[in-house]
Amino acid sequence: MLMRADRSQAPRAATRAHGLALTRVSRRYGPVRAVDDVSIDIPGGEFLTLLGPSGSGKTTLLMMIAGFVAPSAGRIAVDARDVTAVPPEKRNFGMVFQGYALFPHMTVAENIAYPLRVRGVKRSEIAEKVAGAITRVRLDGFDDRHPRQLSGGQQQRVAVARALVFDPDIVLFDEPLGALDRQLRAEMQLELKTLHRDLGATFILVTHDQDEALSMADRVAVMNRGRLVQAGAPDELYEQPRTRFVAEFLGKSNCIAGRMAGRDGELIRLETGGAAVLHRGAVTPPEGRGVLLALRPEKLRVAAQEPRDMANRVPGRVLDIAYLGATRQVVVGTDAFGPLTATGFAWEAAPDLGLGSTAWVGWAPEATVLIEDEADDRSA
């Protein structure tokens, strides 16, 4: 049984956050490039999310950072110290696995104490650190319970406490919320974000959930087929995707293909599907060049009457209407652009729109984003 310790003092934040740098890191399994030439700098104290579909290489990359998988090429450094060949137990990284990996025969306190014991920490110091970690994750009174006596959210907190108790340089999370239900996931997302803010440590989290990545991270790194496609702040990635894959994977997006036809004052005019589209952007493609625009559903307006105040507007017919609680999704089939999906607040929905009815779709020139097609970069 672990010794009890005074819990009157609040847990201390990390005194120093450690940065991580990946330089041209790759991992190959025969002809398969699981991770392909990835380079990224992660400043100390950042919360970075590695986001991508199954098979994108995000988990393999995390396992290389942790030291469980050796890179085929490239360099991994912590604060400019090369750790590429350093075994995982000597990297001083905390790790939270999707299944939590708690020892079923150990109590909460014993699970949290385990990494301290294997490091040879004194018994009295272990008790103090474990007590602080339990308080930090709000599990006071659960010291003597076993994992089978805990809910999924409580088990997740134990796993987080175990990963933090030895003051790791960096904390890694492999789909830590994947086993939780929707409501609990939302609660734990907020808890992890608050914990990161309180500690000031460097967090790296892997997920395939777009909402999770956008809501939690300081920065999101989107991966596909082993490559790092784009990295940036959540709002930057969502509002300014560079490629079709990012636009379609990070939330929903309508994509409109066309050709550069000239300028109308400050606006770029594109010809597509027999119609003209006005786009406002800093980049002006060469005239006649094929272009691709991304248009988020929430930036579209659907109405029964032609929206003459919108620079871009196209008629069509309602193909589908889906009530999503706070929002309503409407799919309008158009001759010029094919199906266009629009979302808006449910209470603002036009009452005279129904399945099969004529509708107009409109949007502002600022609503579209010029992107790269990169068909080979899309998930299969």
Image: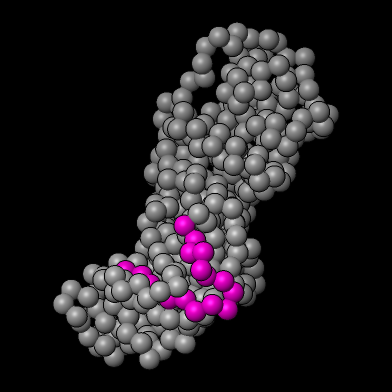
The color scheme shown is one colour
- Residue 321 sits in which quadrant? bottom right
Residue 328 within the magenta-colored segment of the rendering:
no
Residue toward you, 290 or 127 = 290
- Residue 299 sits in which quadrant? bottom left
Q: Residue furthest front?
A: 352
- Residue 138 sits in which quadrant? top right
For the question of whether residue 194 can be seen, the reply is yes
At which x and y percent is residue 327? 53, 56
Which quarter shows the N terminus? top right
At which x and y percent is residue 158? 68, 30
Q: Which residues are magenta?
A: 348-365
For the question of whether residue 290 can be seen, the reply is no
Residue toward you, 267 or 220 = 267
Residue toward you, 151 or 278 = 278
At x 29%, y 77%, the residue is 278
Q: Is residue 85 above or below residue 354?
A: above
Figure disc tally: 0
Residue toward you, 72 or 158 = 158
Residue 354 within the magenta-colored segment of the rendering:
yes
At which x and y percent is residue 340? 49, 75
Q: Is residue 369 above or below residue 148?
A: below
Which quarter shows the C terminus? bottom right
At x 47%, y 87%, the residue is 335
At which x and y percent is residue 124? 64, 11
At x 61%, y 14%, the residue is 128
Q: Residue furthest left?
A: 265
Q: Is residue 130 above or below residue 252?
A: above
